[in-house]
């Protein structure tokens, strides 16, 4: 498929925050075919909005820094938060590249993010968020990312109907491939490999089909290799 698929982690982040009572608008630039800042409409960002910048990969760091700087120049009172798996791998270095950002989050724990937004909106003390360490503008999680994926609400998606969509199958990986950035994230954040219940996946696919989606791409961090026996059982149940 030529179209860039939405970032599924961004969708889960939005759905968890909305379930906690927050209003969320997703601006997924790659998926929405916004190649550069010259094509971005900064008017969608309002004064006092909390702006969350997810780092997808290492290739657009300079563009990300420009985006954060433009947001800061537009509204001095916006709280700008950086995060995502790639950010978490080397949070200190990334924060040094984004001097206009207020907070960095070295974890993809959606519950932590929800607690952080609650703390900011209530003007609380960031050092008082449970199971975290706040040091030099960065929040670190002190608990393992081992919650059940089936407990999460379905990811928020664009209101625009697309023929192609993606569905998360599993998150985390027990492998130690040195060429894979996910391996570094798992080590730093204590992530365990978790897979979703096949029935829940089919329910999500059915909902997407009703909305006009014709093709579904299954996303799995570990390429279905949980272990041979477990993987065979899971694939059998799914099929």
Image: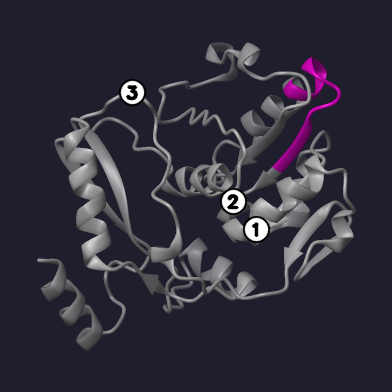
For the view shown, which residue lies furthest in the front direction?
21
Instruction: Establish if 58 lies above or below 231.
Output: above
Across and down, in percent, residue 138 comes to 80, 55
Q: Which is more N-terminal, label 2 or label 3?
A: 2
Q: Which is more N-terminal, label 3 or label 1?
A: 1
Labelled pair 1, 2 in contact (Cβ < 8 Å) = yes
Give the residue drawn at x 39%, y 38%: 6
Mark in front: 3 vs 2 = 3
Report which residue position mark 2 lands on: 84
Instruction: Establish if 44 lies above or below 216.
Output: above
Q: Residues within 10 Å of mark 1 (few under 14, many from 20)?
A: many
Across and down, in percent, residue 5 comes to 34, 37
Residue 88 badge: 1
Position of the C terminus, as image quadrant, is bottom left
Rendering quarter of residue 50: top right
| Direction from residue 127 to residue 72 in the image, left or right | left
Instruction: Establish if 46 lies above or below 117.
Output: above
Position of the N terminus, as image quadrant, is top left
Q: Residues within 10 Å of mark 3 (few under 14, many from 20)?
A: few
Report which residue position mark 3 lands on: 160
Dot 3 falls on a residue whose secondary structure is loop
| Direction from residue 195 to residue 115 in the image, left or right | right
Across and down, in percent, residue 202 comes to 19, 56
**Quick check: is 150 in the magenta stretch?**
no
Q: Which residues are magenta?
A: 71-81
């Amino acid at each position: 498929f030529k179209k860039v698929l939405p970032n599924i982690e961004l969708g889960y982040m939005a759905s968890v925050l909305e379930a906690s009572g927050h209003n969320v608008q997703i601006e997924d630039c790659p998926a929405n075919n916004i190649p550069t800042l010259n094509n971005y409409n900064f008017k969608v960002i309002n004064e006092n909005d909390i702006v969350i910048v997810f780092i997808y990969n290492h290739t657009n760091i300079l563009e990300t820094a420009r985006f954060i700087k433009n947001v800061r120049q537009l509204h001095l009172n916006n709280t700008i938060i950086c995060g995502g798996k790639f950010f978490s791998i080397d949070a200190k270095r990334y924060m040094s590249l984004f001097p206009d950002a207020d907070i960095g989050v070295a974890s993809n724990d959606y519950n932590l993010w929800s607690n952080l937004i609650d703390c900011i909106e209530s003007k609380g003390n960031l050092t008082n968020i449970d199971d975290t360490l706040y040091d030099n503008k960065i929040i670190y999680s002190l608990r393992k990312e081992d919650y059940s994926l089936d407990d999460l609400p379905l990811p928020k998606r664009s209101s625009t109907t697309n023929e192609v969509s993606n569905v998360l199958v599993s998150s985390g990986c027990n492998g130690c491939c040195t060429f894979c950035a996910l391996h570094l994230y798992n080590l730093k954040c204590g992530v365990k490999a978790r897979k979703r219940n096949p029935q829940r996946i089919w329910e999500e696919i059915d909902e997407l089909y009703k909305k006009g989606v014709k093709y579904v791409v299954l996303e799995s961090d570990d390429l279905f290799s949980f272990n041979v026996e477990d993987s065979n059982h899971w694939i059998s149940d799914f099929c």
